[in-house]
Amino acid sequence: MTTSADLRQKKPHTDAAATQSSRTPAGVRDWLALGLLMFPVLLVAVDNTALTFALPAIARSLDTSGVQLLWIVDAYALVLAGLLVAMGSLGDRIGRRRLLLIGTMGFAAISAATAFAPTAEWLIGGRTALGVFGAMLMPSTLSLIRNIFPDPNRRRLAVAIWAAGFSGGAALGPIFGGWLVEQFWWGAVFLVAVPIMLPLLVFGPAFIPESKDPNPGRVDAPSILLSMLTMVSVVYGIKELAIEGPGALPLFIIAFGTAMGCVFVRRQQRLASPLLDVSLFRNRVFSMAITANVLALFSFNGFILFLSQHLQLLDGMSPSASGTAMLPALAATVVAGLLVVPLVRRVRPGFVVAGGLSLSAAGYCLVAFGDHSAGPALLLGALLLLALGVGAAETISNDLILGTVPPAKSGAAAAISETGYEVGSLLGTAILGAILTASYQGQLMLPDVVAQTVPADSADRARETLAGTMELAETLPGPLSEALAAAARAAFDSGVHITAAIALVLMAGAAVLSAVVLRRVPRAR
């Protein structure tokens, strides 16, 4: 695998060349290239959080069910996660910058078409197509950063800026999403992809150096199929298990996906040029950093999913107002990511990662045991803790992922790291969202007077989602509306308590595990 220095100097990468590169300050051109690489990261983050804030409007406009809402969120991440490794391998062969630009053009075009989806099925299909092009975008960013900045200290700063771009996008997403939904319509959150991607299309070819493997192996189609079968089956099975409860079908689907994953791993071990180098996972530091990355995004996206609904549907805030209320906490993610760069020179990286996950656990502890009826202050305070923890854990775990593998493996490591991002985001919305939906549906008790007043089909639809319940409440006379809204709040808050307790246990366990496994990683120099 060549580096950006290799391509500029027209000579193969050697240890001596790497040493010399580490002594040479990164030029303005390299930092401009890094700035351009932030645009696809920014887009993915904006897309995720902006869409979350548009969900109530989408639910009302397209008359979606609870399951359809989850698939609108998850279809993109599911396809993207299943294709990341394959697209990372393709980038090694045709060039990572080339694949990045192809993905950019496709993503912008599909986003524009999806903005005008007339049905929920159309919107799910558009999100699926976006996942294909999104998979072309993400693996290229970290591997290009690894090659542009071979010096560990500069790479760590570049990774922190990269993570800050992701967090900054998450902070901008609610503002853009809320404002666009209020001023225009929910489809405008998709159109925002076009102006975000334009600078990368215009300036990327000039400032981002091309990088690819000079001796790539062939693409193994069965491996791509196996990776997709694994991801789709396992996540779909988990969603069905959370919504429908224990049953033969979801357990069978999960078992099938697990079996496909085992076949995939065995095939990679036999191939001369595997789609995924599974030997990387033998490194405990690498594996633990991936796990920390997955769980950090798991907690973050799961929290955003229910917080946006709570602020808009229960606290009565507009989309833009709720986005603005979340902005300080989301911006704190950026600050935390940058502050831990000098911190790891004094504190071992493993303890920084564990501390970040502990902050996430503390945030969920507030939600699990706090009183939500006093207003949004408690939930926003919990988000602040969660955001600080995610910012710290993400930055250092990503640096560990890149730093524990040789330069020749940077493409594979970047693809795995990006897969971890998407898997964490996907599982956060799929598992925590499904648990919340199932709990809400199971605990919502429509007042007798409401059940006797509205048609049976309207009552059944109202039980599926919080948005559906509150929409029905708006059509009822004052006392009936208040009674139904109170029942919805009680059911939703109960589900949030259960969901937060589960996330709390996961985050606390991950913090302890990170401290133990990563305790021997030395401080940065």
Image: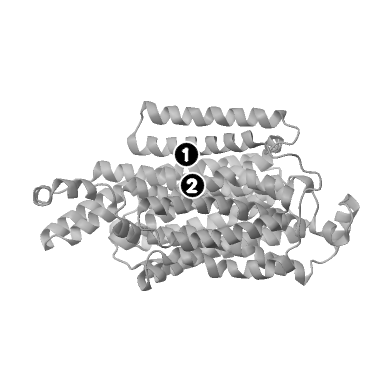
Determine which residue is flagged by label 2: 426
**Amino acid at pointer 1:** Val
Query: Is 366 displayed left or right of 443 in the figure?
Result: right
Q: Is residue 345 visible?
A: no
| Disc on res. 193 | none
Residue at disc 2, secondary structure: helix
Q: Residues within 10 Å of mark 2 (few under 14, many from 20)?
A: many
Describe residue 463's horizontal placement relative to residue 11 as left or right: left
Q: Is residue 475 above or below residue 356?
A: below
Q: Quadrant of the C terminus?
A: bottom right
181 or 107, nearer to the observer: 107
Three-letter code for the amino acid on which mark 2 is drawn:
Leu
Q: Residue at x 38, y 64 (%)?
A: 186
Q: Secondary structure at mark 1?
A: helix
**Which image quadrant is residue 105 in?**
bottom right
Whole-Å distance between the Cαs marked 2 and 1?
8 Å
| Left or right: 309, with 83 as reference point | left
Q: Which residue is mark 1?
A: 235
Nearest the eye: 146 or 197: 197
Q: Position of residue 121 (x, y in %)?
A: 38, 50
Tell me which colouring the rendered structure shows.
Answer: one colour
Tell me what residue is drawn at x 12 percent, y 48 percent.
Answer: 451
Q: Are marks 2 and 1 in contact (CB under 8 Å)?
A: yes
Q: Earlier in the sequence, mark 2 or mark 1?
A: 1
Image x and y of residue 326, in percent? 43, 65
Q: Residues within 10 Å of mark 1 (few under 14, many from 20)?
A: many
Give the vertical position of 164 relative to 268 (above or below): below
**Residue depicted at x 69% and y 57%:** 98
- Quarter location, residue 11: bottom right
Measuring 38% from the left and 66% from the top, which residue is drawn there? 322
Q: In x, y percent, where is residue 63?
A: 29, 54
Give percent across and percent down for residue 104: 60, 60
